[in-house]
Amino acid sequence: MSTIYDVARLAGVSKTTVSKILSGNKNVRPSTLEKVNAAMQALDYVPNGFAQGMRRNATHTIAVLLPEQYNYGYMEILAGVESCANRSGYMTFVCSTGKDGRYEEKYLREMVRRRVDGILYFTYRRNTKSLNYLERISRDIAVVVMDNVLKGERLDCVRVDGQALTKQAVCCLADKGCRRIAYIRGLHGYDATAERFRGYLDGLDARGLAFDVRLVEAAEFTMEGGAQAACRLMRQKPDALIAATDMLALGALDWFGKNGVNVPRDVRVIGFDDIPLCLWSRPRLSTISQNQRMLGETAVKRLLARMSSPEEEPFTLLLGGGLVLRETTG
Amino acid sequence: MSTIYDVARLAGVSKTTVSKILSGNKNVRPSTLEKVNAAMQALDYVPNGFAQGMRRNATHTIAVLLPEQYNYGYMEILAGVESCANRSGYMTFVCSTGKDGRYEEKYLREMVRRRVDGILYFTYRRNTKSLNYLERISRDIAVVVMDNVLKGERLDCVRVDGQALTKQAVCCLADKGCRRIAYIRGLHGYDATAERFRGYLDGLDARGLAFDVRLVEAAEFTMEGGAQAACRLMRQKPDALIAATDMLALGALDWFGKNGVNVPRDVRVIGFDDIPLCLWSRPRLSTISQNQRMLGETAVKRLLARMSSPEEEPFTLLLGGGLVLRETTG
DNA sequence: GTGAAAGCGCTAACAG
DNA sequence: CTGTTAGCGCTTTCAC
């Protein structure tokens, strides 16, 4: 592959001149410009991003750390991240931390090795070690934490107000006459989950409903998890069910369908996220919408802003959302 | 961020020694190793991938060029690519060429600039200019074309035998008594589509059914495209419908549902791809399965193999598939 | 076993 | 306007 030197030689100028043209410097005689352009063309020259990055100290690359595997639940966020990043001239690495986050540290280190300009940390699971590490490197690499509640760490955060929104959902169901509202939460150790759960408690409180531990189940963030939790919960005869994510709710819905539970007549159901799949379930899933695409875009924008002003105080961007009432709420 | 030099100084050795330790060279006295490791630890040292890449001439990075936007249709392939690449120590850039491939050249160039080790070119649309470019750079960067029929280009290719599989689908419908089998193909200029379409013709031929142009519609690869095509086709009163992709079939199915067409009684439907969403449609979509996850994994494996033996003759890997009969075929 | 020196491809002063 | 020079952080001979 040809180098800047080859171009210079062929054009009969110095590397410097070529370099200047590469970076759009206008202080070049038109005839020189032409010669150099011709040489680049002839050699099919593409500058070496390494060498550039090394000098410029910027890679125009960001990395996203995702929890678990790719699945329908994260696709919209990813699409938002991707398109926003690309529009700003950044390319994106996507990494799954793998089940129970086993690759998390390995990837974090790999991102640093590659000197990405920014890291989007998007794994609900609270991993103190990772967060400490991120805080440490955040002097050199911009970091934005998505949808994870930070206790004290000095990092930017973009997230949805899960507490307020879940509270709304509970109130909505109570106002429709539900009295035994069950809740499927994520496993412990996930902050966003804990927060949403607090919203559930708030809602019960606001409507004067008693809290009953037996109406709450924790589950893995998968459809199977949702189905199992639904199965256990039905012994308590709830008249409504809220799940911490749509995937959980969809799993529950699936289980209901297979076991003769009529939604919404017997149980009303509300999910969280508003993934496109909600439109495909029968009945269509009511949910708490958090515009995932926008979440992704906002996170990237925050990241870019952080890069250009590293000294600014870190803060949390709280995104709104809303109830989307479809068929599972009657 | 600290450099190899900082480590060397702190450990009281030379850069060379540190470098040797980084690359696992054993010719180091244990006590030196210990000192250096301690220094690395203390400085939180992570080598600079640029500088390494520049010397080693390898980035351990691959790039995937996707058609259009992220959508449910590509997610499984991406998941396969991602996980296989990561398992082999590679990170992956994902780029959407955008509507009508407007960013294709820009991204291709950007990948070269970043000196990725391999490119997965996965956009059905036949773009001669891009293919020529890919062929040219394939001396330096491994290239694998996915699911695109190559006419003469000297590039590796991994794809599914769309022709044989579509023929099977036609035969299957004919054997169920269908006589007016309609087909929704992709827009012209997409090779995989043309190939699948040939399979449609083969099938008609095999079962002695006459070809009727009015039973064929071309559409964009979206649900809306599928719905519109279905709408136009219904005037011809078909008794079966095959679509070139699941997304098209799902769009048609949706239109049928809204317009009182009973599937499978009035029209039987078969898609292509077997994306997970098929399980969510009502009725559940019968389809031609191509194990997308494996497709992605296979492509990455081919890419890695190509990297280690650049001189080998390029060839095409033809993956099998099968009919998955669910509810839309009765 | 260890280090000095050269160089990967590029950019950025600084002269001319 | 253009070229000379000196690195960026790392690896790699080749001596010691």
Image (cartoon, coloured by chain):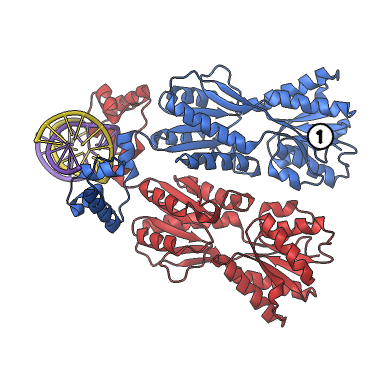
Chain colours: A blue, B red, C yellow, D purple
Q: Chain of mark 1?
A: A
Instruction: For the C terminus of chain A, give its image quadrant.
Output: top right
Residue B69 in view: yes
Residue D9: x percent and y percent?
Answer: 29, 32
Q: Nearer the viewer, residue A61 or B171?
A: A61
Q: Nearer the viewer, residue B283 or B16?
A: B283
Instruction: Report helix, strand or loop for mark 1.
Output: helix
> Residue at the location (74% across, 72% down)?
B181
Q: Is residue B169 above or below residue A49?
A: below
Snapshot quadrant of residue B185: bottom right
In the image, taking residue C4 as reference, residue A81 lies left or right, namely right
Q: Which residue is mark 1?
A: A232
Q: Is residue B201 above or below residue D15?
A: below
Residue B249 in view: no
> Residue at the location (28% across, 44% down)?
A21
In the image, taking residue B291 as reference, residue A57 lies left or right, namely left
Query: What is the three-letter code of the residue carrying label 1?
Result: Arg
> Residue at the location (90% across, 28% down)?
A177
Instruction: For the N terminus of chain A, give its image quadrant.
Output: bottom left
Residue B29: x percent and y percent?
Answer: 26, 31
